[in-house]
Structure formats: C-alpha cells, structure tokens
C-alpha cells in the first residue's frame, strides 16, 4: 500500500562518503501503518509541529503530508547547539486500489498525526453462500 522514494538519497550518501564528512541526520516522518477489517491506519510522528502547519492532501492515488516545523531563537540569545531540524517536510504515500479516498480522516494529538483511510465497500471481503443441492449451477 505504501511506498517511499527519495531519488537524491544515494547521491547524498556517495557525496558524503567521498568527503569523509559526518552526515547530518535528516529529519524524517516515522510511520506505522496497519489495516483493520474496514480501514487502513497511518500513525506519523511529528514532534514539535504546530497542528496548523499540517497539510494532508490526496490526489488520484497519492496521499501527501506536508508539515512546517519552525523555531525562532529568542532575541538576545546565543545559539550553542542546533541539532533539531527545522523547515518544511513532505512525505508521500502511494495508495492501492480499493480505498475510499473521499472519506479520509485525520487527527493530531500528542505529536502523532493519525490518518484513517476507509476500504471501499466493493473491496471489503464478503462471504459467499453456497447453495444447496436444489440450487445447482451449470456452466
């Protein structure tokens, strides 16, 4: 259901290894994904993100999550260490067929964005009743 692709990751890795410099740790959006009987669930860690900066969009079979994580140094403060990444971050998920993208829901609590994607009615498993001997099918 989900795929992640970063075309520049390998190029960055090679460049860093050529210069033998430590590579700064990139901020990512770690995800847990699972399916219940009638929904897919995505739980995305977004610590320190203002909920008003979270943008979730779906177009065709692509779900895009865009967030802005900003921080401003207080006036008169001297920066000693800055390891927490800031800026705009994007993650895309390619959704399989059989999902009802018109009914996607999202919520954000305690630094976790939860996205619920319903399985389309026609894609849900259904039980087929086998007829008795009085109801014989012929080809």
Image: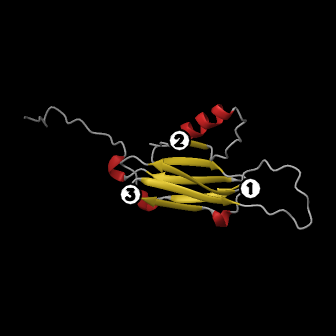
Return the residue at label 1. 48
Return the residue at label 2. 34
Helix, strand or loop status at disc 2? strand
Judge whether 105 appears above or below 83 on screen. Answer: below
Judge whether 18 appears above or below 28 on screen. Answer: above
- Gap in angstroms between the C-alphas marked 2 and 1: 24 Å
- Gap in angstroms between the C-alphas marked 1 and 3: 30 Å
Q: Position of residue 75 (x, y in %)?
A: 89, 68
Task: Answer few, some or many: residues within 10 Å of disc 3's Cα (few below 14, many 20 plus, some between 14 and 19).
Answer: few
Return the residue at label 3. 60
Drawn side of residue 13 relative to residue 37, left or right? right
Q: Position of residue 41 (x, y in %)?
A: 53, 47
In primary-sequence order, the first of circles 1 and 3 is 1
Q: Position of residue 127 (x, y in %)?
A: 32, 40
Q: Position of residue 22 (x, y in %)?
A: 73, 36
Circles 2 and 1: CB atoms closer than 8 Å? no
Drawn side of residue 67 relative to residue 76, left or right? left
Q: Residue furthest front?
A: 19
């Amino acid at each position: 259901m989900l795929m992640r692709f970063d075309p520049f990751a390998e190029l960055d890795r090679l460049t860093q290894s050529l210069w033998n410099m430590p590579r700064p740790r990139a901020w990512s959006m770690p995800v847990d994904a699972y399916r219940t009987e009638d929904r897919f669930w995505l739980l995305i860690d977004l610590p320190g993100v203002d909920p008003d900066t979270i943008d979730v969009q779906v177009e065709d079979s692509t779900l895009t999550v865009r967030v802005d994580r900003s921080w401003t140094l207080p006036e008169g403060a001297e920066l000693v260490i800055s390891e927490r990444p800031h800026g705009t971050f994007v993650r895309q998920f390619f959704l399989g067929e059989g999902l009802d993208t018109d009914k996607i829901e999202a919520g954000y609590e305690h630094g976790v964005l939860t996205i619920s994607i319903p399985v389309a009615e026609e894609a849900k498993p259904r039980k087929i009743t086998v007829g008795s001997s009085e109801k014989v099918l012929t080809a």
